[in-house]
Structure formats: C-alpha cells, structure tokens
Image: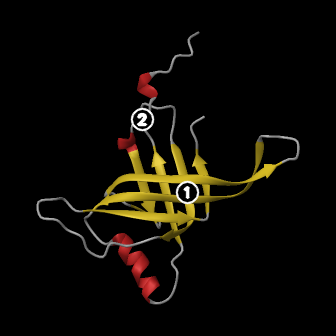
Amino acid sequence: MSNAMQASKVINGTYGRLWFQGAELTSVKSFECKQKINYEDIKQAGKLNKSRKMVGYELAGTFTLNKIDDTVAAAVCAGINAGIQPTLTLIGVLADPSSYGETRVQINGITIDNIILMKFEAGKLGEEEISFEAETYQFLDQIT
C-alpha cells in the first residue's frame, strides 16, 4: 500500500464559500482566518534553553469581495454610528467535490477593523478587502 498523496485530493480554493450574518456573500474572492497562539517564555536556572507556556490566543483574518453592494458596510456602519458595537459571525466553507470531504468553520464575536466607504480607480474592477478580529471559533465539519 502506498502512502503517496493523490493530487486530485488537494483542495481547490475555487470551491470556498463565505456566509456573513447568515447570508452567503456570493461576491467573495478570498477568505483567511488565523489563530495566533500567545506564549510567555519560561527560563529556568541552570538551563540555557527556554520553554514556553501558552497564555492565550488571538483570531484575525481578512476577506476580499468583488464590489457589488454595501452589505458589510451596512451591517457595521449603522451600529457604529449609533454607538452600538455589532455582533458579527462568519462561516467559511471549503468543499471541493474531489476532496475527502468539507471543512466548515464558524467564527464568532467578529469586530471589523475598517470599512471602505468608497474606493474606485478608472479602468479597474471594484473590490473591497475587510480585515477583522474575532473572539471564538468552532469547526462545524472537518476533513480527517
């Protein structure tokens, strides 16, 4: 039996999808969310090396949309202008039909770092990149 990787099983990002506040963002071009693990160094007498202790984590990411509407800006700006911090959720799905399954991750407690109110350049298609931080996440489906 061979342990060789099958090229046809490598997941194609074209099959990625993104939901914002329960509605699919059909204009999504790309999506990324990372978990950064925070550590503190532990030094011990008599040892030259250090160890590390996990003390928390941070979630952050970005998504890029083809500019077709103001869905995200509308969800964020109305609350911010009223002094209310919106509670936002994203669900990312990657489901290549040639792969071994699908990955779905729900990201909760999202805070948007900035909103582009307007941006254009003659001869260029419109897009918007939105960066965010989040509080928690959970895998709804995993490929194992």
Circle 1 is placed at which residue position?
106
Q: Is residue 38 above or below residue 112?
A: above
Q: Position of residue 65 (x, y in %)?
A: 32, 59
The label nearer to you, 1 versus 2, is: 1
Circle 2 is placed at which residue position?
97
Q: Is residue 7 left or right of residue 1?
A: left
Residue displayed at 42% across by 23% down:
7
Mark 1 secondary-structure assignment: strand
Q: Position of residue 110 (x, y in %)?
A: 53, 67
Q: Amino acid at mark 2?
A: Pro
Placement of the C terminus among the 4 image quadrants: top right
Answer with mark 1 or mark 2, whichever residue precedes in sequence. Answer: 2
Question: What is the total number of numbered labels drawn onto the structure image?
Answer: 2
Q: Is residue 39 left or right of residue 139?
A: right
Q: Is residue 95 above or below residue 82?
A: above
Q: Is residue 37 above or below residue 133?
A: above
Task: Say which quarter of the image contains residue 73.
Answer: bottom left
Render colour scheme: secondary structure
Q: Nearer the viewer, residue 75 or 111?
A: 111
Q: Amino acid at mark 1?
A: Gln
